[in-house]
């Protein structure tokens, strides 16, 4: 199971009823944060989740509404006596940008591991899941992220018995371990069926529609996508400033054949997204207007 919470869905500036951009995902004791806008700490507290399991922070880009909450978050994590390493993933300049922000958080009791994204796409494996960063189209270097959790095939006891595999190794093989000792050489492939459908989450913001988004979001269980403007007369403005309208996001969701889409990163001028959703759902019926604290549990299919 993957827990997902849209901590903040605002763009440009925080509002009394809307925090700036951040998403948190929890899996198997590990937590990943994508972006860390102003108000992220409060949003985590309001959700009732913990800072402690955050071991990966990904940044889409380095505009203030996506990273301005980082220094305070680092200080809080440090004051909680955290010692475990924290991995950060982001576009070129990651260590320099974070280093500048750390002027007010210079001494931390835990190391930071910096992973700058190389090229148009890069995959990172960690904590039992896979993160793929893919370049999008904003007015600065910007990336979207896909998180995938694979699921092995079903254990086949009959196959294990046919091959005289000792019972004491079954659970280890089911867990993906290879056994090589005096009893023989046994691999998971000897007892597992074909891989089953895993879980896929895609998040992208501050961009025009791109083929890289459609391709990486394809068949996602949840697609969280920027919808800066719901007003149809702001399509030209969205294009000029390299953002997306609700309707462009819905078209991406439709062509990528995702299960569900949440809109996020609203313009401060857009106080209520819901009045525009009927037209959005004409394009993609499984669309929802994101809001702060919106959550989902993504489950493995039976």
Image (cartoon, rainbow, N blue to C red):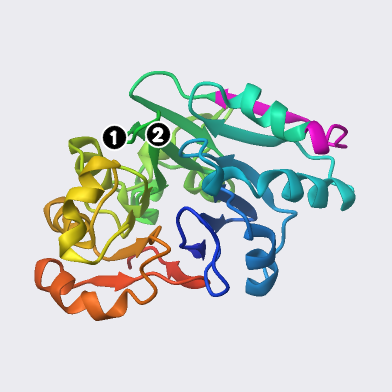
**Direction top: furthest residue:** 119
Instruction: Please tell me how crowded label 1 is: few (under 14), some (14-19), or many (20+) other residues with Cα within 10 Å.
Output: some
Instruction: Give the structural element (helix, strand or loop) at label 1.
Output: loop
* Residue 16 rendering spot, x and y as whole percentages: 58, 73
Q: Is residue 90 left or right of residue 265?
A: right
* Residue 249 rendering spot, x and y as whole percentages: 22, 56
Nearest the eye: 51 or 166: 51
Q: Is residue 189 left or right of residue 87?
A: left
Residue at image location 61% in from the left, 42% down from the top: 56
Instruction: Please tell me how crowded label 2 is: few (under 14), some (14-19), or many (20+) other residues with Cα within 10 Å.
Output: many
Q: Is residue 109 magenta?
A: yes
Q: Is residue 71 magenta?
A: no
Q: Tell me where the magenta segment starts and ends, as one range.
A: 103-115
Residue at image location 85% in from the left, 45% down from the top: 78
Q: CA distance from mark 2 to mark 1?
A: 7 Å
Q: Which residue is mark 1?
A: 137
Residue at image location 23% in from the left, 36% down from the top: 212
Labelled pair 2, 1 in contact (Cβ < 8 Å) = yes
Q: Which residue is mark 2?
A: 142
Q: Is residue 71 visible?
A: yes
Q: Earlier in the sequence, mark 2 or mark 1?
A: 1
Q: Is residue 1 visible?
A: no
Nearest the eye: 112 or 43: 43
């Amino acid at each position: 199971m993957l827990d997902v919470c849209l901590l903040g869905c605002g763009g440009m500036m925080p509002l009394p009823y809307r925090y700036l951009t951040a998403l948190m995902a929890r899996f198997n004791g590990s937590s990943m944060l994508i972006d860390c806008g102003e108000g992220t700490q409060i949003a985590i507290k309001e959700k009732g989740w913990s800072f402690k399991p955050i071991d990966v922070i990904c940044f889409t880009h380095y505009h203030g509404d996506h990273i301005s909450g980082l220094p305070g978050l680092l200080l809080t994590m440090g004051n909680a006596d955290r010692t475990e390493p924290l991995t950060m993933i982001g576009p070129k300049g990651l260590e320099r940008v974070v280093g500048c922000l750390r002027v007010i958080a210079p001494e931390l009791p835990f190391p930071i591991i910096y992973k700058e994204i190389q090229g148009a796409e890069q995959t990172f494996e960690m904590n039992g899941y896979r993160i793929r960063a893919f370049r999008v189209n904003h007015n600065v270097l910007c990336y979207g992220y896909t998180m995938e959790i694979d699921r092995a095939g079903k254990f086949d006891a009959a196959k294990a018995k046919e091959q005289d595999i000792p019972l004491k190794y079954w659970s280890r093989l089911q867990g993906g371990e290879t056994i090589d000792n005096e009893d023989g050489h046994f691999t998971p492939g000897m007892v597992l069926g074909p891989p089953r459908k895993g879980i896929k989450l895609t998040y992208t913001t501050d961009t025009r529609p791109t083929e890289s988004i459609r391709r990486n979001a394809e068949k996602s269980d949840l697609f969280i996508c920027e919808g800066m403007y719901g007003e149809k007369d702001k399509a030209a403005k969205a294009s000029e400033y390299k953002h997306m309208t609700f309707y462009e996001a819905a078209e991406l969701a439709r062509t990528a054949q995702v299960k569900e889409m949440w809109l996020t990163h609203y313009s401060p001028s857009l106080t209520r997204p819901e009045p525009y959703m009927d037209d959005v759902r004409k394009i993609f019926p499984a669309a929802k207007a994101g809001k702060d604290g919106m959550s989902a549990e993504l489950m493995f299919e039976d």
